[in-house]
Image (spheres, coloured by chain):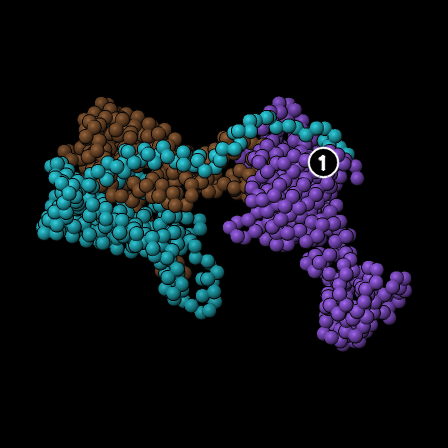
Amino acid sequence: MTEIAQSQSIPLPLASERALRFDWRKAVPLALAAPLIVYMLVFYALPVLAMLLRSVNDPSWTLSHYATLFGDVVFAKTFWITISTSVTVTLGCLVLAYPVALGLVRARRMAPLILVIILLPFWTSVLVRSYAWMVLLGRHGLINEALLALGMIDRPVRILNTPIATQIAMIHILLPYMILPIANALRQIDPSLLRAASGLGATPWMTFRQVILPLSMSGVIAGTLLTFVLALGFYITPAMVGGPRDITLSMLIAQQVDQLNWAYAATLSAVLLATALAILAVARRLPGVGNAFRTSLR
Amino acid sequence: MLARVAPASVVGLILLFLAFPVIVVVVVSFSSATYLTFPPPAFGLKWYEAYFSNPDWLKPTWVSLWVASAVVVLSTTLGTVAALGMARLPRSLRVVATGLILSPLIVPGIVVAIGIYYAYSRYGLVGTPIAMVMAHTCLAVPFVVTSVTASLAGIDPRLEQASLNLGATPSATFWQVTLPLIRPGVLVGALFAFITSFDELIVALFISGSGAVTLPRRMWDDLRFQIDPTIAAVSTLTIVLTVLLMGLAHVLRKHAERQVSQP
Amino acid sequence: MTGIGSGASVTLAGLEKKYDRVAAVDGISLDIRSGEFLTLLGPSGSGKTSTLMMIAGFETPTAGDIAIDGRSVVAMPPYRRNIGMVFQNYALFPHLTVEENVGFPLKQRGVPKAERARLVAEALQLVHLPGYGARYPRQLSGGQQQRVAVARAVVFKPRLLLMDEPLGALDKQLRENLQLEMRRLHADLGITFIYVTHDQEEALTMSDRIAVMNDGKVAQVGSPEDLYDRPSNRFVAGFIGESNFLPAIVRGIEDDVVTAECDGALIRAICPGRPASGETVTLTTRPERLRFADSAWTATTPQNRLSVTVTEAVFAGERCRYMLQAGDGTSMVLKEPSSAAIRRRAVGERAEISWSVADTILV
C-alpha cells in the first residue's frame, strides 16, 4: 500500500451550519437579473411607454388621435412611401443575397475572405455608409463620372436625393441582414442529401430547385422579415440621401417631435412599432423561422 | 454545381457592391480636392490635418470616446451579472426578462430615441453626457447579454458539479471556474458595447443638445449644412477603429471556441 | 485485502428519489463496507446514477438517509462532503493546466503552494502521468484525461471515491487496460470505491461486491461469484452473463433441492425457497455449464439430463455456440470451447445434454 493511503485525508475548512440552510438556489438568480431589469425599465422602457401613452392620453384619455390618422393624407402618403420603399429594398436584398449566401457556404478557401467582405461594411456605422453613397451618387461622384466618361450622358445626372438613391443605399446597408440568415440555413443542409439527389439523377438545377431552395426557406423567410422590419424603421439613410419630398414614417415622426406635436408623433410611433412587432410575431410562429431569427441576431 | 446557379462573377460583383462604398470613403479621405469628387484628382493628408487641428472635431471625438468607455463599464457590469442570473431563472421569468432586455434590437430606433427624449427632457437631462451614457447603455446591453449568455451555454454543466464536489463553495466556483470561462464572452460583449455607443446617432440627435455633442452628431450636422471631405477623413478613422475592435472580437470568439473543444 | 479501516463506510437507508409520481430511486437500503469496491450495476433508468448523485450531494433524496462513517450527510452540501468523484466525461477544467486541475481541491483546502506541488506530483505518479502537469486537457487523449480526473479525485486523500461510468467513452482495448488499473488503484489506496456502470462484464471484473439495480430498486447484492452462480431472481439471471430459462412444474422438494418436470424429464435444481407442488417455476442454468452427454468427460457431481435437437451451430473464435431446442419448444444455448479434439455438432442432430444439479437455480 502506498504512502497516499497511509496519510490522513486532507480536511475542508469549517463553516457555519446556518449558512447552509438558506436556499440560495432560488433567490440569487432573481437578485442578479434585477439590477439590469430595473435599469432598463427606468431609463428605456418606461420612457418609451410614457411617450407612446401620449397617443391615447392627450389631453385626456381618447382614441381620437388614431381616428384622425385614417383620414390624414400626409400619414397615408408617408406610410405608403415607407412600405413601398421597404418592399422594394427587401426584394432587392433577396435577389442579391441568395447568390452570395450560396457562395459563402460553398466556397472553401475563399469563405473567410467573403465573410470579411460581408462583415466589414456591416460593422461600419450607418452614417458612414450613407455618407459613402452621398459621395458615389453625387454630382461629381463615381457613377456620374463613369457615365460621363463612357459617353452615355452629357451632363451629370441627379441621382442623389432621389428615391432611387435611398433604395440603393438601403439595399447596400441591409444586405448582410439578408445574407447571414440564408447562409445559416444553407449551412445546415446535410451535404449527403445533395449527393443522394445527384446519385438519383437530378441535374444541378433540379437539385437546387427541389432540395436546396426548399430547405433554405426558413432562412429566406427569416432574412426577408428581418430586413423588412429594419427597413420600415430606417431614418438616417433616407434623411441623408433621399429626396426632400420623400419622407418616410420615421422622418415624419422626427419632424413632429421637432414641432413638439407629441400626440401625433406618439401615434405614428405606435403604428410603426405595432407593424414591426406584428411582423416579428408572425415570423416567430412560422416553423423553423423562429430559430433562424435567434441565430442571426447573435 | 455552384457555377450554374451562382456564377462566381455574379457573386463577385455583388461583393464588390458591398465593399466598394467603404473603399470609396477611404480613398476620398486622401484626396486633396476641396469638393467631393471621385476619383480624386490628387492625394494628400489635407483632410486629416483639418480634422486633427480643429477643436470643433476633436471635442466631439473626445465626448464620444468618453461616453463609449463609460457605457462599456456600465453595460458590461449590468449585462454580465444579469446574464448569469437569467441563465438560472425559471423559464417564464427568463422569457420576459429576455424580451425586455433584447427589445432595443427590435424596436425601431426613432421610437426609442423620441421616447428617451420625451422622458429625459422632463428631467433636464438633455445635453448632458451622463444622460448619453444612460441611454447608450440600454442600447448596448443586449449585445453584452447575448454574448455572455452564449458563452455560459457553452460551459459543460458538469464542470460546476465537479468544482462543488472538489470542495469549492458556490462563490468560489463562480470566481475560479465560471468567470474565467465566460471571460471571452464578456470581452466580446464589451467590444460591441463600445462600437454601439461610439457609432450611435439617432438617440444622440435628440439628447445631445449642445453640451453632449458626440462625433456622429457632429458629422451629421456637418453633412446637413456643408459638405467637406473632412468627414471622409473622420469616417475612415472610425472605420479603422471599428474594424480593429470587431476583428479583435472575432479573434476572441475563435480562441474561446478552441479552448473548450474536446479532442 | 489490506487497507481496511482507511476507507469510509456508507449506509443507504430507504433512499428514495421521486419526480412527481415517477420514482427514479424507489427505496434502496445498502451497507457499503469500509474499503470495499462496490459496483452499482444496472440498465439505464435503473436509478444507479441518481443514487450516486445523491451520495455526492447533487441531488436531494425525497426520503431516506445517507450516512458516511455513521454520520448522516443528507443535509450537507456537496462541497462539504469530502468525497472524491470521477465523472463520465471527466469534467476537467479546460482553462486550467493538468497541474492546476489536480491541485484545485488542494487549493480549496488552503494547502500551501509547495505542499500542493508535491501532492500533485504524487497523484500524477499514481496514475502514470508524471510530467504532464503543464499540459491542457484538450491536448490529452481520452484515456489520459480520465487518468487526470482520477488523480484530481484522489489527491486530497478522500476516504470514499465515486465513479460514474468513467470508462464509457473509451474503446474496448483501452477500457480493459484501465479496468485493471482501477483495481490496482483500489488495492493501493485502500479506500472505498463506489462504481456505477451498465456493463456487467466490467462489474464482474472489478468489484468486490455488486448491487444489481432495476427500476430504482436493488435486485440483488453479492460478490461476482454469488451473483453469477446463484442469481436470486430472473432479472439478475438474465442481466449478468447469459442464462437459459426452463419452465418447469414442481414435483417435489427435499432440503434445498427441488425436483421439477420439464419436457417430460425430471430436473433437479438448487432452491432457497419453498415452492408448492404443482407450481410452475423457472429454472435457470448457464450456457457454458451445459455439456453434450456423449463427449469425452466424466461427471463427478449429480447431473441433470435433457434430450434436445441442435437448431444452430456458430463458431465464434474461442467458443462454439449451439442453439438447442427441447421437445416442448424451449430453446437453450450451449457454449463449449472450440478445439480440434471436440466434435462439432451439426444442425438437426439430436443429442443429450447434461449439466450439474449444483449449476441449476430456481429463480
Q: Amino acid at mark 1?
A: Gly
**Between residues B47 and C182, which one lies in front from this camera angle?**
C182
| Chain the render paints brown | B
Say which colour chain C has.
Answer: purple
B134 to A242, vertically: above or below: above
Q: Which residue is mark 1?
A: C7
Q: Residue at x 63, y 46 (%)?
A: C14
Say which colour chain A has.
Answer: cyan
Picture quadrant where residue C329 is located? bottom right
Where the N terminus of chain A falls, by quadrant?
A: top right
Image spot of residue A221 (x, y percent): 32, 55
B54 to A215, vertically: above or below: above
Image spot of residue C201 (x, y percent): 71, 53
Q: Dot 1: within a 10 Å radius of its alpha carbon, few (fewer than 14), some, or many (20 or more) residues?
A: many
**Between residues C340 and B103, which one lies in front from this camera angle?**
B103
Q: Residue at x 73, y 65 (%)?
A: C282
Residue A281 seen: yes
Where the C terminus of chain A falls, by quadrant?
A: top left
**Between residues C15 and A108, which one lies in front from this camera angle?**
C15
Tell me: A79 left or right of B27: left
Q: How many marks?
A: 1
Residue ranking furthest to the front: C276
In the structure shown, which secondary structural element does the residue marked by tag 1 occupy?
A: loop
